[in-house]
Image (tube, helix red, strand yellow):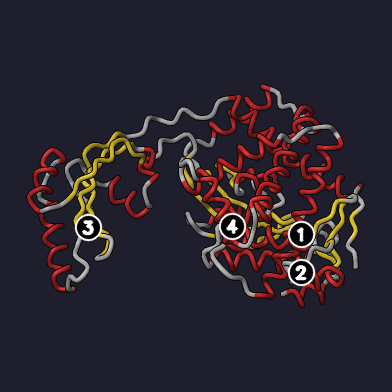
Amino acid sequence: MIAQAQAAEETFGPTNIPISVVGPKLNDPNNRAPVAVVNGSVITGTDLAHRVALLVATSGGELPEEELQLVRLQVLSNLIDETLQIQGAEAQELEVETAMVEGRYAEVAQRNFGATADAIDKMNEQMLAFGSSAASLKRQIRGEIAWQLLLRRNVIPFINVSVEEAQEQLAQLEATRGSTEYRIGEIYLSTTPETRQAVYQTAVGIVERLRQGGNFQAYARQFSQASTATVGGDLDFVQLNRLPPELAREVEQMQVGELVGPIEVPGGFSIVLLIDKRQVLMADPRDSMLSLKQVSISFPPDISDEEFTSRVNAFGEAMSQVGSCELADAKAAEIGAQVVPNNSIRARSLPPQLQSILLEMQPGQSTPGFGSKEDGVRVLILCDKQAPPAASGKTVAQIQQEIENERIEKRANAYLRDLRNDADIQFPG
């Protein structure tokens, strides 16, 4: 891939990284020499290696060397932008407080390891195991906060959406009641005529890794050049008429969970994940609240396949005859099973295959058994099902916020482009 990129173009990304100069430096994680100098601030090979290691770890494993070269170029481009954002905040005396950075780092630790006292210690250990560092992730967080502060001062105050404009769009939304809207994850990579082929190859590599199990949100945070990168590329629910026609045509044909790309759109390429879809202003059965009882049995490690099959069949037969949640505990005790109640769980929070089964069931019915010899086998008994209330629709204030977010995104992209154009970016030979 990198050879193709070199053959096609001599530079990479919106900051025109010279591949012939930078490429040879990308293979040495212990290189403390400058790879790029941004307005006097140095980005070393070690800085780059730590950030790449963080991305590789969250993508599910090793990357082929040729693909890794493109990843390193893209991450270097991200580090340059991040440096410009931090410098921009400093130039305007917008302080990114250490407490803010540490607070967000703690939030990431808690998401990964739960609200435990040693969550941050575990996060630090994980960073080292990845070949990265806590400092690298904290620098990324610092850049995100700096950018938010810059936008709040220089962009957001100048975006105004009138009540009348929002009301007009709300009326249009009411007119489309029952039509489909789509929750989309997007990774957007911008191009110029000179960088188009190299960026396309990067996008192809990202799609390959995602299809091999890479984490979409992690790739969006590192690669996407849209403002939604900080939330893992999540665009939330949108209607097709709010998307570029090139994306709309693809999304309309996609199934939930499907990944498509790269799709060429004005100014770059997009990689799209369809997270969910629903009908506008209509109640969604997946918002039903379910009360369940999980009944499970476990097996000795040396159980034979025949005995396992026999016990699973007997367990399923016994559960199918229970008829109500009130009788589940007694039946479970009789056959040596364990019962765990799950009250007020939203159907959409369950795996898709369970959603469809449970939503078609009546109280007292049970699912087929699922699980394995090693992990045990479980059934779910439906105790109660509360249909979702009728959708109330969006408010004028919510519509205003959505329009504002779209305009902020466009202004933010232009602002970052100006920072790049005004910067002194050097790539020491």
| Mark-to-mark CA distance, 1 and 3 | 49 Å
Callout 2 touching callout 1 (CB < 8 Å): yes
**Quarter of the view holding residue 32:** bottom right
Q: Is residue 82 left or right of residue 300?
A: right
Instruction: Count the numbered circles shown.
Output: 4
Q: Look at mark 1 in the image and give the residue it sits on.
A: 76
Q: Look at mark 2 in the image and give the residue it sits on.
A: 26
| Mark-to-mark CA distance, 3 and 2 | 51 Å
Can residue 205 be seen? yes
| Crowdedness near tag 2: few (<14), some (14–19) or many (≥20) residues, C-alpha within 10 Å | many
The foreground one among 37 and 64 is: 37
**Which one is earlier in the sequence, the residue at label 3 or at label 2?**
2
| Mark-to-mark CA distance, 1 and 4 | 31 Å
| Crowdedness near tag 4: few (<14), some (14–19) or many (≥20) residues, C-alpha within 10 Å | some
| Crowdedness near tag 3: few (<14), some (14–19) or many (≥20) residues, C-alpha within 10 Å | many
Q: Is residue 83 left or right of residue 59?
A: right
**Which one is earlier in the sequence, the residue at label 1 or at label 3?**
1
Q: Judge whether 361 appears above or below 203 on screen.
A: above
Task: Kindly identify the residue that appears in the image at 15 percent across and 57 percent down.
Answer: 316
Residue 231 at x, y percent in the picture:
61, 44
Type of amino acid at the residue the image marks with label 3: Gly
Q: Judge whether 149 appears above or below 371 on screen.
A: above
Residue 61 at x, y percent in the picture:
55, 67
Q: Nearer the viewer, mark 1 or mark 3?
A: 1
Q: Judge whether 27 appears above or below 282 on screen.
A: below
| Mark-to-mark CA distance, 2 and 1 | 9 Å
Q: Look at mark 3 in the image and give the residue it sits on.
A: 369
**Quarter of the view holding residue 35:** bottom right
Q: Nearer the viewer, mark 2 or mark 1?
A: 2
Type of amino acid at the residue the image marks with label 1: Leu
Callout 1 touching callout 4 (CB < 8 Å): no
**Which one is earlier in the sequence, the residue at label 2 or at label 1?**
2
